Amino acid sequence: MYTDPKLGSSLLENVVVREWLQGVTGSGDKGVVMQKLTSILIVGLVCLSPLATYAQEVSAGITGRVTDPSGSAIVGATVTAKDQDRGTEWPTSTNEDGIYAFPRIPVGKYSLKIEAKGFKTSLQSDLVLELNQRARLDVAM
């Protein structure tokens, strides 16, 4: 391959750079093609940029264990988190270990109602969740 001693690069590299510069400056049909490619690239980047913001967490969570007075797990207890400002309710139930979880709920002020057959209903009020907080609230019925 021929190398231009003045430029220190190959002739092929010089031709490629020259062609690219002609496309960027808009001379001839290559300029139109380069403008279209640049436009497509910019539109693609603009369309993909919001995807990075979706990965950010904007919620909170509550988890805990529901037990009887002896400390044994209460299986199948109904646990309802209610957003006191919006009135939205999220129900769940405890698993075989008595654990409940609300992994992603909006930040805000909540009340937590726990109901189980044979037990008095428990109500926990004014539970304030902040951004990315994972609150733990164990309840003995």
Image (cartoon, helix red, strand yellow):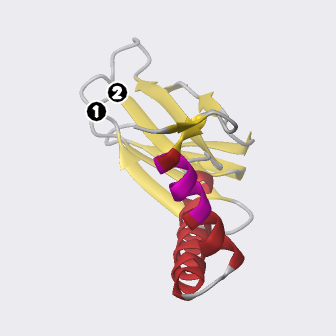
Q: Which residues are magenta?
A: 12-18
Element on which disc 1 rests = loop
For residue 71, which quarter of the picture?
Answer: top left
Q: Position of residue 118 (x, y in %)?
A: 33, 38
Element on which disc 2 rests = loop
In the image shown, does 67 or 135 lie closer to the viewer? Answer: 135
Q: Position of residue 124 (x, y in %)?
A: 64, 41
The residue located at (61%, 61%) in the rendering is 18
What secondary structure is the magenta-colored segment mainly?
helix
Q: Position of residue 86 (x, y in %)?
A: 69, 69
Q: Which residue is mark 2?
A: 98
In the image shown, does 102 or 30 lie closer to the viewer? Answer: 30
The residue located at (71%, 60%) in the rendering is 84
Q: Amino acid at mark 1?
A: Asn
Q: Which residue is mark 1?
A: 95
- Disc tally is 2
